[in-house]
Amino acid sequence: MVSVLKVIANTQAITSTNNNINSARLVRVNNIGGAATANVACFDTVGNTQLWFVQVSNTEVVYLEKNATDALTSNVSTTTGTSVAFRN
């Protein structure tokens, strides 16, 4: 089975400031450089409550599903996020 990804918006930096990545429901997250593992956290922006976090190793790519209003942060400045759609 082939999966198709459609890029919805330009790549953005994920920093220590909440970013909902264009209200994305699915985000392609990439730790593009440096030696550090990124701690990517997801926050409910209504209550500013941390919902979960994942670690993204150097040069690793992961796909994260979240609510459109949820925001991501990262402790590593080389982390980026791209809003993508998907279908099977």
Image (cartoon, rainbow, N blue to C red):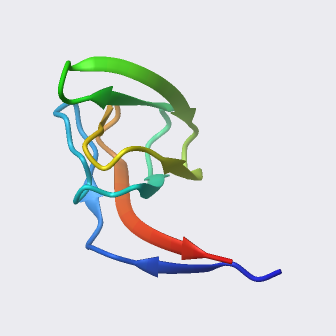
Q: Residue at x 44, y 50 (%)?
A: 33
> From this viewpoint, which residue is outermost toward the right?
1
Dividing the picture into quadrants, the one containing residue 16 is top left
- In this view, the residue in front, 17 or 64, is 64
Whether residue 76 is situated above or below residue 32 in the rendered picture: above
Question: Looking at the picture, how far across and down is residue 42, in whole percent?
Answer: 37, 31
Whether residue 1 is situated above or below residue 42 in the rendered picture: below
The reply to whether residue 75 is visible in this rendering is no
Q: Quadrant of the C terminus?
A: bottom right
- In this view, the residue in front, 62 or 33, is 62
Q: Is residue 54 left or right of residue 67?
A: right
Q: Is residue 48 left or right of residue 80?
A: left
Q: Residue at x 28, y 28 (%)?
A: 44
Q: Is residue 19 left or right of residue 2?
A: left
Question: Looking at the picture, how far across and down is residue 31, in whole percent?
Answer: 46, 48
Whether residue 19 is situated above or below residue 61 in the rendered picture: above
Q: Quadrant of the N terminus?
A: bottom right
- In this view, the residue in front, 22 or 79, is 22
Q: Residue at x 36, y 64 (%)?
A: 83
